[in-house]
């Protein structure tokens, strides 16, 4: 267990956590909303330090990232818990459903037991030895264990750069996040986290509440992360009757164009009720192809250049990347995840018309 870097002392052994936008006020011996950050005598400690659920190798397109390091294989790691309680969560067992695991970690700490951990150096070296180009922090919300994730990322990049046979491209690390990080967390991560895919669930507090989430200042912090040099892609899981209001989607798309730029990739995903942990959400139907295409058309009318659709149950996938200028396909993908053909120059310009693309090779 390690002391957090993201909190403020308030006196009387009370602290204010600054990892996420909830900014929990935590009394001595208590934990925050995520159940993973505990006040120990006026200092904040992370119960997740050294705790990962394993290492899974995936195409980076699966995260999804379509414009950042296309064709790369990444070692994906996660931990336990979340600062949201999303009723549609695809990783419920590892996120807010992992209450028993988090309770065990807290009890073991209280009894002075030594919880088995993995050091950041050990994790990073395992990934380096595997020859993988990057790390994706995913499965649960990485913001709640940002310090440990940052240490892993730093060790991974340092270890890779020390090798004489390092790959031709620099090592990279990405976050798959709900975007609830704070300015302090972004400042901590920016030197080591190169890109983030933010799961934008909607564009108003009411929509987030329907899902069991918390909007906070996610849009503002997305802009701040981009200004700090973190490459952004966005994902919206389109849930019928929950976040598919055309006016709200229009507001969301207009905000992306205005504040993040029209070349920001927006991924629209199909809702699958069989994957939802909440009984009421299990009664919601699959998102249809028509609904996905309608949402995409709203984004296109707003001026977004890169809108992708993942809707296998609806028979509706849109995965190729087109040049916004000449409309030729610059990345052709097979099944959505594997690039078959990349027609982009090393300087990130289109091979057909030389237009500068928002793609990091």
Image: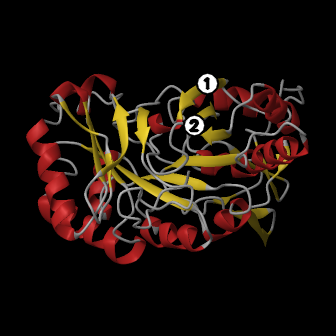
Q: Is residue 298 left or right of residue 139?
A: left
**For the point 16% across and 29% down, which residue is it?**
314
Q: On the rendered structure, is 92 left or right of 188?
A: left
Question: Which residue is label 1 attached to?
Answer: 56
Q: Which residue is mark 2?
A: 72
Say left or right for 115 vs 38: right
x then y, percent, for residue 283: 18, 28
Compare marks 1 and 2 and give the one earlier in the sequence. Answer: 1
Residue name at image x 12 percent, y 35 percent: 288
Query: Is the N terminus in the top left, top right, bottom left or bottom right quadrant?
Result: top right
Q: Nearer the viewer, residue 97 or 173?
A: 173
Looking at the picture, tell me which residue is in the foreground, 148 or 207. Answer: 148
- Left/right placement of residue 269 relative to residue 129 reads left
Asked if residue 259 can be seen in this view, the reply is yes
**Quadrant of the rendered structure where residue 41 is?**
bottom right
Q: Residue 303 occupies which quadrant of the picture?
A: bottom left
How many residues crowd mark 2 within 10 Å: few (<14), some (14–19), many (20+)? some
Give the tally of numbered discs. Answer: 2
Residue at the limit of the structure toward the left, as seen here:
290
Q: Residue at x 56, y 55 (%)?
A: 346
Residue 204 x, y percent position in the rendering: 29, 64
Q: Nearer the viewer, mark 1 or mark 2?
A: 2
* Image position, residue 297 (x, y; %): 14, 57
CA gap between label 1 and label 2 equals 14 Å
Q: Which of 78 and 1 lies nearest the eye of the viewer? A: 78
Q: Position of residue 222 (x, y in %)?
A: 49, 66
Mark yes or no: residue 32 visible.
Answer: no
**SS state under label 2:** loop
């Amino acid at each position: 267990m390690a002391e957090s870097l993201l909190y403020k002392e308030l006196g009387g052994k009370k602290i204010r956590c600054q990892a996420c936008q909830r900014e929990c006020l935590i009394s001595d011996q208590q934990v925050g909303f995520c159940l993973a950050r505990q006040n120990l005598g006026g200092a904040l400690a992370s119960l997740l330090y050294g705790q990962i659920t394993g290492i899974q190798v995936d195409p980076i397109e699966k995260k999804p990232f379509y414009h950042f390091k296309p064709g790369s294989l990444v070692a994906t790691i996660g931990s336990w818990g979340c600062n949201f309680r999303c009723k549609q969560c695809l990783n419920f067992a590892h996120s807010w459903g992992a209450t028993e695991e988090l309770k065990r970690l807290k009890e073991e700490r209280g009894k002075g037991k030594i919880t088995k951990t993995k050091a950041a150096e050990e994790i990073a070296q395992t990934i380096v030895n595997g020859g993988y180009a990057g790390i994706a922090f995913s499965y649960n919300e990485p913001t709640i264990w940002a310090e440990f994730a940052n240490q892993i990322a730093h060790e991974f990049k340092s270890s890779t750069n020390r090798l004489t046979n390092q790959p031709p491209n620099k090592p990279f690390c990405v976050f798959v996040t709900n975007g609830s990080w704070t300015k302090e967390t972004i400042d901590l991560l920016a030197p080591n986290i190169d890109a983030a895919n933010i799961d934008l669930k909607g564009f108003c507090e009411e929509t987030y509440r329907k899902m069991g989430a918390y909007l906070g200042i996610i849009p503002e912090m997305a802009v701040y992360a981009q200004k700090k040099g973190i490459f952004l892609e966005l994902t919206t899981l389109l849930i019928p009757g929950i976040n598919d209001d055309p006016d709200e989607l229009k507001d969301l798309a207009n905000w992306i164009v205005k504040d993040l730029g029209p070349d920001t990739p927006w991924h629209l995903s199909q809702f699958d009720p069989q994957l939802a942990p909440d009984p009421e959400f299990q009664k919601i139907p699959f998102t249809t192809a028509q609904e996905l295409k309608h949402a995409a058309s709203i984004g296109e009318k707003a001026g977004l250049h890169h809108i992708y659709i993942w809707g296998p149950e609806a028979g509706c996938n849109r995965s190729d990347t087109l040049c916004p200028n000449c409309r030729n396909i610059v990345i052709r993908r097979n099944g959505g995840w594997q690039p078959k053909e990349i027609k982009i120059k090393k300087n990130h310009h289109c091979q057909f018309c030389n237009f500068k693309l928002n793609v990091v090779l």
